[in-house]
Amino acid sequence: MIALERHYKSQPLRLDACRMGNDLNVSVYGGKVPHIGGVVMGFMSPALHEADRLTYTEQVVSLQGHKDVELARPVAKKLAKALECTVVAACGVHYPNILMEDILEIEQRVMDMVAELITKLSTSSTEPCE
C-alpha cells in the first residue's frame, strides 16, 4: 500500500492506494470528519466505433447530501487514464463551514498526491492490498 498525506488548516488529507491485481483501490479522506461520501469506479475501454482507441468510462455512487463524488471523479479519471487500469476512488473529506477557496485548495492538494502516486506506481512495483 502507498500512503500519502498533506495537511490543510491543520487537518490531515490522506490518499491511500493499493493494487488489486492490475486494478487500483484508492481512498481519499480527511478533515475533521473523514468518511465515505462518494465512490467512483473509472476504467478505460475500447471506444464504441474505434476499437483501437480507449475511452474513459465511470460509474458513480454518491451518499445523499454529500459532494465528495466531485473529488472522486477527477481522482479516478486521472489515475485510470495514466495507468490504463480500473480504479475505484472512495472519497470523504469534511471541513466545517467550508468555502469555495477551501474546496479549490483541497482539490489541488489531492491532485498533487494523485500525481505523486502516478509517479510512484510508474517507477516501482506496488504490493497488493494487505
Image: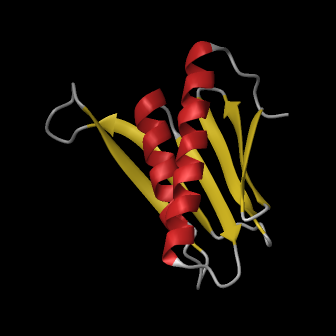
Q: Is residue 82 above or below residue 100?
A: above
Whether residue 50 is visible to the viewer of this picture, yes or no, is: yes
Q: Residue 94 appears at what percent x and percent y? A: 70, 73
Q: Quadrant of residue 124?
A: top right
Question: Which of 107 and 130 lies nearest the eye of the viewer?
Answer: 107
Q: Residue at x 78, y 62 (%)?
A: 11
For the N terminus, give its image quadrant. top right
Q: Residue at x 23, y 38 (%)?
A: 47
Q: Residue at x 59, y 50 (%)?
A: 110
86 vs 17, left or right, is left
119 vs 46, left or right, is right
Color scheme of the displayed model: secondary structure
Q: Is residue 53 above or below residue 28?
A: above
Which residue sits furthest top? 124
89 vs 10, left or right, is left
The tally of labels here is: 0
For the C terminus, give its image quadrant. top right
